[in-house]
């Protein structure tokens, strides 16, 4: 009897849990309103200074350049603004002290936090 009740409570708890929602990004124009949310990107990792998919930096994924992957993570944004006589100030969407290891000048840059990936077959 106790096992049945425990099993029933476990089933109810598991079905009541909300599944984490992941937004699929199809275009760089979709990025701004999704900052702070779990997102998924699918594409070929670019071969620029920083590996990217759809304008999102993939720090630490240099070995995946040229490969088609599916990557999931929390979208974050850093805005670099020039200041009077200074090299610039960064405004980041997180308070974790992220500093890009490469200075690309002023602009808006997106990255994935806690990213996981899997290789996808080439179309």
Image (spheres, rainbow, N blue to C red):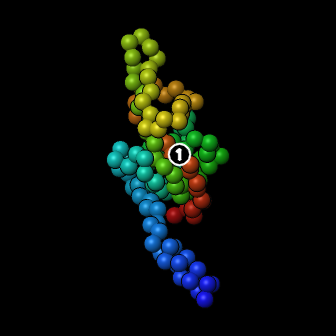
The residue located at (59%, 86%) in the rendering is 4
Q: Is residue 18 visible?
A: yes
| Direction top: furthest residue | 85
Against 95, residue 39 (above or below) is below
In this orientation, which residue lies closer to the viewer: 8 or 64?
A: 8
Which residue lies most toward the right here? 63
Pinpoint residue 33: horizontal percent, then vertical percent.
Answer: 34, 47
Q: Position of residue 48 (x, y in %)?
A: 54, 38
Q: Is residue 83 left or right of residue 115?
A: left
Q: Tell whether 8 sits left or right of 92.
A: right
Observer able to see residue 43: no
Residue at x 53% of width, y 32% of height: 97
Q: Residue furthest front?
A: 2
Query: Is the residue marked by circle 1 packed among few (<14), some (14-19), or many (20+) residues within 10 Å?
Result: some
Total number of numbered labels?
Answer: 1
110, above or below 44, in the image = above
At 40% from the left and 45% from the top, the residue drawn is: 35
Q: Quadrant of residue 49?
A: top right
Residue 98: % across, % down: 53, 33
**In the rendered view of the protein, which quadrant contains the N terminus?**
bottom right
Residue that mark 1 sits on:
113
Residue at 46% across, 42% down: 76
Residue 109 placement: quadrant: top left
Q: Secondary structure at mark 1?
A: strand
Q: In the rendered view, tell whether residue 93 sits above or below residue 37.
A: above
């Amino acid at each position: 009897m106790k096992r049945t009740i425990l099993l029933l409570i476990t089933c109810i708890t598991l079905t009541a849990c909300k599944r984490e929602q992941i937004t699929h990004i199809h275009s760089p124009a979709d990025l701004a309103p999704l900052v702070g949310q779990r997102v998924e990107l699918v594409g070929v990792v670019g071969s620029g200074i920083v590996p990217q998919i759809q304008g999102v930096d993939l720090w630490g994924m240099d070995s995946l350049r040229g490969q088609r992957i599916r990557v999931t993570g929390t979208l974050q944004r850093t805005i670099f603004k020039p200041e009077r006589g200074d090299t610039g100030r960064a405004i980041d969407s997180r308070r974790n002290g992220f500093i890009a290891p490469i200075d690309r000048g002023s602009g808006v840059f997106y990255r994935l936090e806690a990213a996981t990936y899997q290789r996808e077959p080439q179309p």
